[in-house]
Image (tube, rainbow, N blue to C red):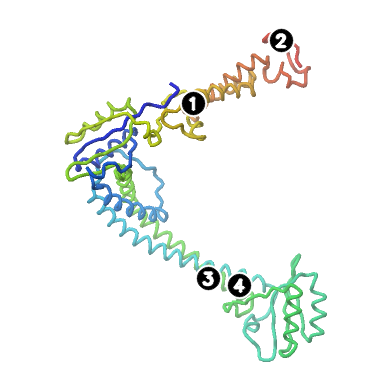
Amino acid sequence: MFRPLAMKQLRIQILTEDLPRACLILAELGVFSPDPRPELEQEFPRLPAERYGELYAQAHSRIERILKLIPLDAPLRLPKLREVSEADLERLLVRLREIWGHCSAFEEEFREVGEEERGVRQLEHALDNFAHLDLDLGLLQGEKMFLHLAIGSAPRSNIPQLKEALALAGSFLYVFMESEEHAHIIVAGPRGEREEEVHHLLDTAGFTPFEIPRELNQEPERVRRELEVRRAAIIKRRRELEGRLQGYRDEVREELEAARRTLAMAEPFVQVDTAARSSGLLSMLRGWAPARDLPRIRQALARLDNPFLILERDPTPKERPFVPTAMRPNRLTRPFTALVKEYGIPRYGEIDPTLLFAASFMFMFGMMFGDIGHGLVIVAAAWFGRRALKSFVPFVVGNGLAATLFGFLYGSLFGCGSPRCRTPSTCSRWPLAGGSGSCC
């Protein structure tokens, strides 16, 4: 009762051709944990799932990339389990490569559209710096033979002093736009010996230069209209591309859903990894399972076409660190089991703290929130919301009953009769648990 389920180590001897189906059957049961320790290398040197796992990994990687571009909204469902062979995986991989060829073409087009859109956005951002400058921006680009130009921004507080200093150096400062903290300026002066002095003054004043892209070689308003035309063309191209992608998505949706189902049914054989070894026609599958589930395993494996043999034994003391822990299923304590797992799962052979945790949790909850009315409200809420709470109904009901019990001990009904009450005039007498009946 206070320990996890007793486990057995199983060695399932089976024909190699039945191995994928056996793995699928065991995965369907959900009680078998593969043991990948390499203790059977000499007797069974081959890994039958090695090539199978490589094909699965390639197909899984390919479909993951495809589903990023063509997502499937429908949840994965496996109406009927079937064995997936290596030939099935090879054919699936070939088809996924073909689909990915089309998807990569769409992805490349989306990338080009995105880069073009980013370029337009950067040009618009650069253009905002020159929105109040009503002249041909092409005149400000490139080096001039006799004129030195500098375009950028500087703190507004430094502009008056910078303007005076530049005037002494033979240069002119023009402010064409101002914000709360910065001013956008143009500095013009003759080239020559004092050019270095101008650079030093600008650096001292915290000047940040602007780079004018070559695309901005006209008046700002005219450039802005051209950028709006380019943005409209980008939006149109993106919509056309999304329409074509939607058409292709509808075309391959059923194939992709079937591919997901195939990979889901192939996964159990991949997950056994080195726990399955073979020597010619005979294979050995090793793992752990609860002792009480052995009849179910034998009955399920009886569906195989060929005979099999199950060898079972108890785990040795040295093997305990490798034995998986199977918590005892209990509908009433299932929510508390989930909370216990958040802290950690006990090792095999250790005490299962679920019942102790459940009792102490409800005790602490009832002690902190003890009130008859509030506790009954919690119980009623759990009952009316049982469809949404599902397996957590016992958890909420138990806490509500604990709060109700402590409410009787405290003599509290919606706060009345407890030390928390601060308004005696609004409380009625509620003599409980030997109390005087007075409120507060």
**Residue occupying the point 32% across, 53% down:** 59
**Residue occupying the point 78% across, 70% down:** 156
Q: Residue at label 1? A: 354
- Asked if marks 2 and 1 touch (Cβ < 8 Å), the reply is no
Q: Residue at label 4? A: 224
Q: Disc 3 marks which amino acid?
A: Arg
Of marks 2 and 3, which one's residue comes earlier in the chain?
3
Q: Residue at label 2? A: 435
**Residue occupying the point 22% across, 36% down:** 13
Task: Give the answer, above or below, for where 382 lies relative to 55.
Answer: above
**Residue 84 sits in which quadrant?**
top left
Of marks 2 and 1, which one's residue comes earlier in the chain?
1
Which sits in the foreground, 199 or 262? 199
Task: Give the answer, above or below, for where 91 lies relative to 363.
Answer: below
Of marks 3 and 1, which one's residue comes earlier in the chain?
3
Task: Give the answer, above or below, for where 294 lies relative to 210.
Answer: above
> Does residue 23 show up?
yes
Q: Residue at label 3? A: 230
| Spot occupied by residue 213 in the image (x, y as percentages of width and height) | 59, 77
State how far apart marks 3 and 4 are (Cα).
Answer: 10 Å
